[in-house]
Amino acid sequence: MDATLPASRTPSKTMIVTKLGALMSSVIALVPVLGWALGGGIFHWTTVFLALVVLPILDTLVGADDANVDPAREQQYLSNIWYRISVWVYLPIQLSVMFFCYWLIAYGNLATYEIIGLALSNAFALGISGLTAHELMHRDKLDRFIGVLIFSGVGMGNFLIYHNYGHHKTVATPEDPATARFGETYWHAAPRNIWGKFKASWRIEAERQRRNGRHPVCLHNMMIWISLGEISFVGLLCALFGWVALPLFATQYVASRFGLSVADYLEHYGLSRHKLPSGEYEPPNRHHAWDDTFVVSSLVLCVVNRHADHHANEGRPYQILRYSKEAPRYPLGNFGMLLHVLIPPLWRKMVHPVLLKYYDEHPEVVPYAMPGALPKHLESRAVFG
């Protein structure tokens, strides 16, 4: 399935992505079923343990690999349909696992601790949907449609509108609710992130209708159709599994929203773009997003961790995303950084020295910070929000 590497290069760990594609996301999504197959009970917590303990440890132990696909071979990877199919398969797996977990909780006569563990495992397994759907949002109409279906399964269909028509235009600026400021904790940034992106989606779509000479409330408004679709889906879940579907859907919605806000926090923390004399911002470049090449993060997160290249080259598919030396880089992979994101003192101790050094060594970088958070010598070139 994979393209052949040049004979002069030794295949490296990150090249596993070119062999497996995005399959690892689907494998992780199936873990709640594995917990049931192992006998249930405490095994219903397997996905939670995997996400919070196993994957961070594996990510750190396996480590990083900075190799990029040889440019001469990129077209082979681009033309191979496997890389799209391996993303598409997440949708039927997502729905199957969701319906299985709902059915087991509604009719399986589980103990309370089993219900909680399975509900959280389901939420974690479906929370990973954002990474596969994100990749699809940047492809053709068919892929975008599949991506909206995946996101709508966790109540986040608006991602298409905000991300494609908002985030990629305003990233690394004060106008972007997904870009966190230096000195801003995750717990302060997350509510602004989640609510700001929801509002932006409706605003972007309303402005699109006005540009086309229509009233914002019309049959052409995608946000209306996306919202009606998600409400209908929740209604179907309630019809099939009873009112227990409401807290279950709410759990997977919250897990997915907060999971995506963790990714946003990691990807653009403390970085801003120059505002030009015209009032426009400079184009997104590789120093406007954080990068990492840790192998486990790349496999599970559909290579979204090579985020600097994603913004500098928006249309580049995941299988050929490049590591960027110009971008700031965390000491650990995305999974390894999870605990640090959630515990602000750990975050400041690990990340702030790295970012302050990056500011000092790259005078072209514009810090984006909370008032009073930066050393005095950086304040003159910073943007505050």
Image (cartoon, rainbow, N blue to C red):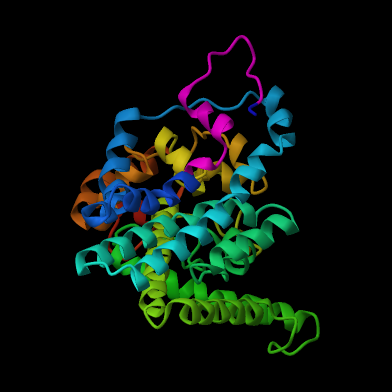
Which residue sits at x=37%, y=65%?
104
Is residue 294 visible to the viewer in this orientation of the structure?
no
Would residue 322 appear left or right of 46 to someone viewing this image? right
Find residue 161 and report its horizontal and vertical position in percent: 62, 68
Which of these two is toward me, 19 or 306?
A: 19
Quarter of the image for residue 92 reads bottom right
- Residue at the image position 60 percent from the left and 47 percent from the top: 87
Q: Residue furthest top?
A: 8
Q: Is residue 169 magenta?
A: no
Q: Residue at x 59, y 41 (%)?
A: 318
Residue 81 seen anywhere in this rendered image of the structure: yes
Give the image quarter of residue 152. bottom right
Instruction: Determine whether 54 is above or below 190 in the image.
Output: above
Q: Which residue, as the protein is rendered here, is positioned at the far right?
A: 213
| Quadrant assignment, res 374 | bottom left
Residue 28 on image: x %, y %: 42, 47
Q: What is the tally of numbered marks visible in this picture?
A: 0
Please identify the quadrant where the N terminus is shown: top right
Residue 74, compared with residue 369, is above or below; it is: above
Q: Is residue 9 magenta?
A: yes
Question: Quadrant location of the C terminus?
Answer: bottom left
Q: x, y (%) of residue 31?
A: 38, 49
Front one among 12 and 311 = 12
Q: Residue 303: percent from the left, percent from the top? A: 51, 41
Q: Which residues are magenta?
A: 3-24
